[in-house]
Image (cartoon, rainbow, N blue to C red):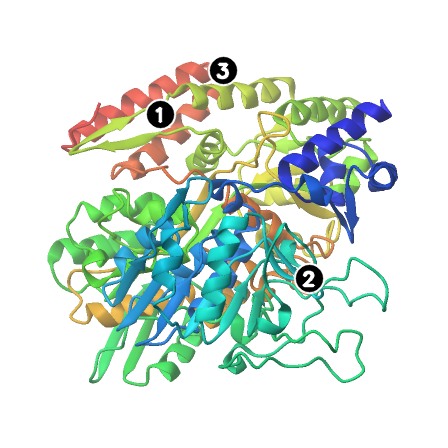
């Protein structure tokens, strides 16, 4: 058994490159103590390398990986690094942009407002990324193509670079080491990189934390030849003299003080690394200059007043920071409370052609119904697609179904995860379920050991989006636009699989059917009668606010159970909203500027989380420190757990292609009818979904939609 487990560890490490001990523990289903014991034995045999809290393959096994693979490794960190690096580029500069997954993020983050910039690159994918920027001229070096990295190497690449001098080089690499300098996995690429270094006035290395302390095959440059390092994590303190395996322990400097010449900073005199000439910039230190907001569109001139309809608590206070940044724009916020009355009022004004606000908040599921009124502005005409890269990918699909027209700016999200009473599970000897099979088995165990008094979970029978999110996580599609037509499949096979699964537990009494957000539900949860549920990112705030001291500190969050053991975390979404600019607005540019600022600026995202519990649609926002504050709810209620990390992982596992239909409001109500009949035993799960499909399809056709 030990040999089998250690063999599995080797397989996982060689596949992923680096794995934390905690993650290995979860994947293998054993304690961290056991994992560390295995790693010690494997390291002594030279089969792995142990680092602080994680494990890596031995140096000789660290082969070069395809770009398509590496772009998904530490992807959030690379995006943050890319944005920090891109902020250094100024109008009129000539920039070398090296090949690599992190340098690709630099290309993606370059401001659409840049003018007169020339980018010289040896990466074909980077050149294609830059096509969108009208103010950037792109020069491709030419040369022999390396398909693994989409890079161009000698002989011709060198011939072009010899005749160009750049203000700045953004350099990718496979390793940054205080003694061995900057290194790369491929000798041909390293030759091109060395010439770039020689031809650039300033060399900026962009590398995530996994590259720090690493040494690869081909040398690029000594540390003394590097002007700045932009990374995502402060390395541990270096070991004493004579010890190997030193990690870069960077001296931190604000981004605005990045050196403008190759003359680097020394570490403090007498320090253990005073020979390392490097200025290190850390891109994930929340609140620092490196968590900078993207470059927003220029504000229109003249005095502007915007009217905003929303239901976000405290939004009137949030906009004060916007008005300070843009003193010529006044924002008037009207809180309509949300719900049907909000949509009725907005729909009435849009149809009347007068009385609508400049900006309004609309949930994703209801957005298509408003798009069909013709009363919303297509924001792609104002350059909204330039900001697509700053949002979690699936959220952009909600506001731009065809990938061209953009009818809103994503605001908040509700990715799905599992919340559970940790003390309750331990009481009944149940481990945290990682698969739906384990969840079903655990539900039976809790029911049996409690004498039928306690349920592991609860089925929300009056919320269609809750059920749809569970099916969404397994790839279900309920609506799909096909040109001018629609396809509706409410009774798709995945939906039937999910509903039959839950109905089986309901019939056995292993899970409950209490109505969500009612006193009956909260009383049962507070009394330890319901031990878990599947909740959106905004759900934990409801638990903290409704339960207060009852079971406080006992709750935790975990990944949504998966249908296949060991698979990548997949999730669905329940709730979330967007900001639209109405066609009636006379200040559309200012309205879009406000909508972007509200959902991408650190100030607004932080305030919306603290005041309204809005889980951000901004990709960078998922890493903001305010979401991780363990001294405040909901994290405090959840035992100090960083629940935002769980939901951030869930958000990035949501299927980007999920769509809603304009007649969803009817489908939402009809779902309740069919579930009621099912729970009363008058319909089977399959029959309930078939009826939902049939009756909703008839209503859609009645409303004039071409749908099948």
On screen, residue 453 versus residue 343, left or right, reads right
Q: Residues within 10 Å of mark 2 (few under 14, many from 20)?
A: some
| Mark 1 / mark 2, whichever is N-terminal | 2
Place of residue 79 in the rendered image (x, y in percent of width and height, measured from the top left): 49, 57
For the N terminus, the quadrant is top right
**Quarter of the image where one finds residue 518:** top right
Q: Residue at x 80, y 23 (%)?
A: 4
**What is the distance, in whole Å, between disc 3 and disc 1 at their CAs?**
20 Å
| Mark 3 / mark 1, whichever is N-terminal | 1
Which one is nearer the viewer's eye here, 362 or 63? 63
On screen, residue 67 versus residue 623, left or right, reads left
**What is the distance, in whole Å, between disc 2 and disc 3 at their CAs?**
71 Å
For the C terminus, the quadrant is top left
Disc 1 is placed on an element classified as loop
What residue does disc 3 label?
681
Q: Residues within 10 Å of mark 1 (few under 14, many from 20)?
A: many
Nearest-to-viewer mark from 3 and 1: 1
Q: Residue at x 39, y 40 (%)?
A: 656
What residue does disc 2 label?
180
| Whether residue 544 is visible | no
Task: Report the label total.
Answer: 3
| Whether residue 87 is visible | yes
What residue does disc 1 label?
490
Place of residue 405 in the rendered image (x, y in percent of width and height, measured from the top left): 22, 50
Which one is nearer the viewer's eye here, 198 or 36? 198
**Quarter of the image where one finds residue 95:** bottom left
Considering every residue shown, the one lying at the far left of the view is 353
């Amino acid at each position: 058994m030990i040999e089998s487990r250690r063999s599995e560890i080797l397989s996982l490490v060689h596949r992923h490159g680096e794995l934390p001990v905690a993650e290995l523990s979860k994947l293998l289903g054993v304690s961290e103590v056991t994992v560390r014991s295995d790693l010690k034995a494997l390291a002594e045999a030279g089969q792995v390398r142990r680092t602080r809290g994680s494990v890596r393959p031995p140096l000789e096994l660290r082969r070069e990986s395809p770009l398509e693979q590496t772009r998904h490794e530490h992807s959030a960190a690379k995006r943050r690094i890319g944005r920090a690096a891109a902020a250094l580029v100024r109008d009129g500069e000539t920039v070398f942009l090296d090949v690599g997954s992190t340098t690709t993020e630099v290309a993606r983050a370059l401001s659409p407002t840049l003018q007169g910039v020339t980018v010289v690159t040896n990466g074909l994918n980077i050149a294609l990324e830059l096509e969108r920027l009208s103010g950037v001229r792109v020069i491709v070096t030419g040369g022999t193509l390396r398909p693994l990295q989409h890079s161009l190497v000698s002989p011709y690449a060198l011939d072009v670079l010899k005749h160009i001098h750049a203000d700045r080089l953004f350099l990718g690499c496979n390793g940054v080491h205080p003694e061995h300098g900057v290194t790369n996995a491929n000798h041909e690429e390293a030759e091109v990189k060395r010439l770039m270094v020689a031809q650039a006035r300033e060399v900026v290395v962009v590398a995530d934390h996994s590259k720090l302390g690493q040494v690869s095959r081909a040398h690029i440059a000594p540390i003394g030849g590097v002007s700045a390092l932009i990374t995502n994590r402060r390395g541990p303190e270096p070991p004493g003299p004579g010890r190997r395996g030193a990690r870069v322990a960077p001296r931190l400097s604000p981004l605005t003080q990045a050196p403008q010449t190759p003359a680097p900073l020394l570490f403090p005199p007498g320090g253990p690394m005073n020979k390392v000439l490097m200025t290190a910039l850390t891109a994930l230190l929340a609140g620092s200059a490196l968590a900078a907001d993207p470059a927003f569109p220029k504000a229109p001139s003249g005095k502007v007043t915007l009217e905003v309809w929303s239901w976000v608590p405290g939004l009137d206070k949030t906009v004060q920071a916007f008005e300070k940044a843009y003193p010529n724009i006044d924002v008037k916020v009207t809180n309509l409370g949300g719900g049907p009355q909000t949509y009725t009022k907005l729909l009435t004004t849009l149809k009347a052609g007068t009385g609508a606000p400049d900006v309004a908040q609309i949930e994703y599921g209801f957005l298509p119904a408003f798009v069909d009124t013709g009363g919303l502005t297509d924001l792609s005409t104002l350059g909204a697609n330039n900001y697509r890269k700053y949002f979690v990918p699936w959220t952009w699909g909600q506001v731009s179904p065809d990938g061209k027209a953009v009818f809103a700016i994503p605001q908040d999200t509700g990715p799905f995860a599992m919340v559970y009473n940790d003390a309750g599970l331990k009481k009944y000897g149940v481990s945290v379920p990682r698969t739906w099979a384990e969840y079903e088995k655990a539900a039976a165990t809790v029911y049996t050991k409690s004498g039928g008094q306690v349920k592991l979970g609860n089925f929300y029978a009056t919320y269609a989006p809750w059920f749809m999110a569970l099916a969404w996580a397994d790839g279900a599609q309920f609506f799909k636009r096909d040109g001018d037509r629609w396809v509706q499949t409410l009774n798709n096979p995945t939906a039937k699989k999910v509903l039959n699964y839950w109905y089986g537990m309901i019939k056995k009494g292993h899970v409950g059917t209490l109505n969500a957000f009612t006193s009956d539900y909260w009383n049962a949860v507070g009394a330890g009668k319901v031990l878990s549920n599947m909740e959106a990112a905004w759900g934990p705030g409801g638990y903290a606010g409704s339960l207060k001291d009852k079971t406080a500190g006992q709750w935790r969050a975990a990944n949504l159970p998966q249908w296949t053991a060991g698979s990548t975390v997949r999730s669905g979404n329940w709730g979330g909203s967007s900001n639209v600019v109405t066609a009636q607005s006379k200040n559309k540019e200012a309205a879009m500027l406000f909508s972007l600022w509200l959902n991408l600026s650190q100030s607004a995202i932080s305030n919306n989380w603290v005041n309204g519990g809005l889980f951000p649609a901004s990709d960078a926002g998922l890493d903001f420190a305010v979401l991780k504050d363990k001294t405040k709810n909901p994290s405090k209620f959840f035992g100090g757990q960083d629940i935002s990390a769980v939901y951030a992982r869930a958000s990035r596992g949501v299927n980007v292609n999920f769509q809603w239909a304009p007649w969803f409001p009817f489908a939402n109500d009809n779902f309740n009818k069919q579930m009621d009949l099912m729970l009363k035993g008058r319909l089977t799960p399959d029959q309930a979904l078939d009826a939902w499909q049939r009756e909703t399809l008839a209503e859609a056709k009645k409303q004039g939609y071409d749908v099948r």
